[in-house]
Image (cartoon, rainbow, N blue to C red):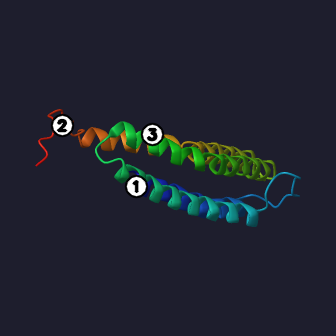
């Protein structure tokens, strides 16, 4: 499971957001755009959600035993619970980056903020797909155990 990758993403967003805030000139806050403090709080919450989700995914995979189908179904249940929070954070990031881009002092700074924002939002929205890809990679590296089709002898 690529939990290290997901945690790195969360940490990178939490660290990168304040750095970008320093690059752009201050601008009046728009009604729906979160403040720098709000986005830092949201990034911390996102990181906490990712850590909790990773623990649940690991538990779901372990509980499924050798059944890939059961593991996949359980992981999908976990992802479905966390998806709304991830989407909410992605929307907040979009608004925050838009506000920062609008306040950028130069076209070059604006372009950089827009590019970084698009990549960051895509990474947040891509967390479920990263988890699925990690599960698929894990399945390829550990073939499913054959099912016992022999009747039990009771011993």
**x then y, percent, for residue 34:** 79, 57
Residue nearer the viewer, 1 or 27: 1
Image x and y of residue 13, in percent:
59, 57
Q: Residues within 10 Å of mark 3 (few under 14, many from 20)?
A: some
**Marks 3 and 2, Cα distance to the nearest angstrom?**
22 Å
| Disc 2 from disc 1: Cα separation | 25 Å
Which residue position is annotated with label 1? 58
Whichever of labels 2 and 1 marks the residue nearer the N terminus, that label is 1
Say what secondary structure mark 1 lies in.
helix
Mark in the foreground, 2 or 1: 2
- The local secondary structure at tag 2 comes to loop
Residue that appears at 63% across and 49% down: 86
In percent of the image, x 45 and y 44: which residue is there? 74
- Disc 2 designates what residue? 148
Disc 3: which residue? 73
**Residue furthest out toward the front:** 154
Q: Along the line of sight, which residue is nearer the eye, 59 or 129? A: 59
Viewer-proximal residue, 144 or 127?
A: 144
Question: Contact (CB < 8 A) between labels 2 and 1?
Answer: no
Could one spot residue 71 in this view of the protein?
A: yes
* Mark before the other along the chain sequence, 1 or 3: 1
Vertical placement of residue 55 versus 98, above or below: below
Which residue appears at 52% of the width and 48% of the height? 78
> Residue 111: where, in percent of width, then height?
69, 43
């Amino acid at each position: 499971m690529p939990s290290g990758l997901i945690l790195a993403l969360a940490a990178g967003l939490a660290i990168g957001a304040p750095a970008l805030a320093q690059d752009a000139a201050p601008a009046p806050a728009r009604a729906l755009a979160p403040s720098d403090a709000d986005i830092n709080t949201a990034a911390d919450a996102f990181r906490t959600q990712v850590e909790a989700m990773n623990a649940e995914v690991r538990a779901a995979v372990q509980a499924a035993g050798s059944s890939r189908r059961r593991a996949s179904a359980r992981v999908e249940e976990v992802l479905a619970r966390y998806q709304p929070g991830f989407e909410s954070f992605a929307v907040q990031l979009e608004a925050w980056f838009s506000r920062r881009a609008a306040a950028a002092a130069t076209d070059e700074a604006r372009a950089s903020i827009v590019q970084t924002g698009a990549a960051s939002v895509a990474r947040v929205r891509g967390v479920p797909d990263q988890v699925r890809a990690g599960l698929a990679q894990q399945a390829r590296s550990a073939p499913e155990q054959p099912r016992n089709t022999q009747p039990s002898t009771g011993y």
